[in-house]
């Protein structure tokens, strides 16, 4: 899959069905030597510049469950479970 094909896809949380953001609004952390995508960074932002700014959300690439034609489904609970088991 090309990076351009990821742009515009919505990120949906499998755990709660929440729309997390859109990949075209996010940044990627890419390993400089291997070129492998390590994480997606969703900017926190605020609603039209009003209200409290949310923190940026870092989504590890390993938490992606599936990439469909219109959306990317992630499971952050899986990442949290793995972190507590270490």
Image (tube, grey):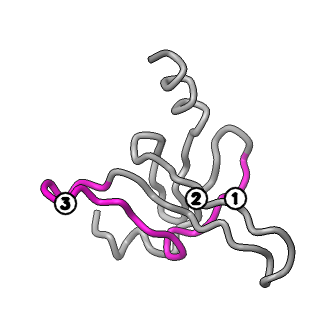
Instruction: Assign a secondary structure to mark 1.
Output: strand
Question: Mark 2 against mark 3, which lies toward the viewer?
Answer: 3
Q: Residue 11: which disc?
A: 2
Mark 1 is surrounded, within 10 Å at the Cα level, by few (under 14), some (14 to 19) or many (20 or more) other residues, namely few
The answer to whether marks 3 and 1 mark residues whose Cβ atoms lie closer than 8 Å is no
Residue at image coords 54%, 65%: 70
Residue, x 76% and y 74% (percent of image)?
46
Name the residue located 49 percent from the left edge and 75 percent from the top edge.
24
Q: Is residue 50 left or right of residue 74?
A: right
Residue of label 3: 32
- Pick whichever, 32 or 60, lies toward us: 32
User: Is 68 colored magenta in this rendering?
Assistant: no
Residue 40 falls in image quadrant: bottom left
* Residue 44 drawn at (x, y percent): 66, 66
From this viewpoint, which residue is outermost toward the bottom?
Answer: 48
Whichever of labels 2 and 3 marks the residue nearer the N terminus, that label is: 2
**Structural distance between the alpha carbons of marks 1 and 2:** 6 Å
Q: In the image, is 71 to the left or to the right of 53?
A: left
- Numbered mark located on residue 19 in the image: 1
Which stretch is magenta?
17-37
Quadrant position of the N terminus in the picture: bottom left
| Residue 84 quadrant | top right
Q: Residue at x 74, y 42 (%)?
A: 16
């Amino acid at each position: 899959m090309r990076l351009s094909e990821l742009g515009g896809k919505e990120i949906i949380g499998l755990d709660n069905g929440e729309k997390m953001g859109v990949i075209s609004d996010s940044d990627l952390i890419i390993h400089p030597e291997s070129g492998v995508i390590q994480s997606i960074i969703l900017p926190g932002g605020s609603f039209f510049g009003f209200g409290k700014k949310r923190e940026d959300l870092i989504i590890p690439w390993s938490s992606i469950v599936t990439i469909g034609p219109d959306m990317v489904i992630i499971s952050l609970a899986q990442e949290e479970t793995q972190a507590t088991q270490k």
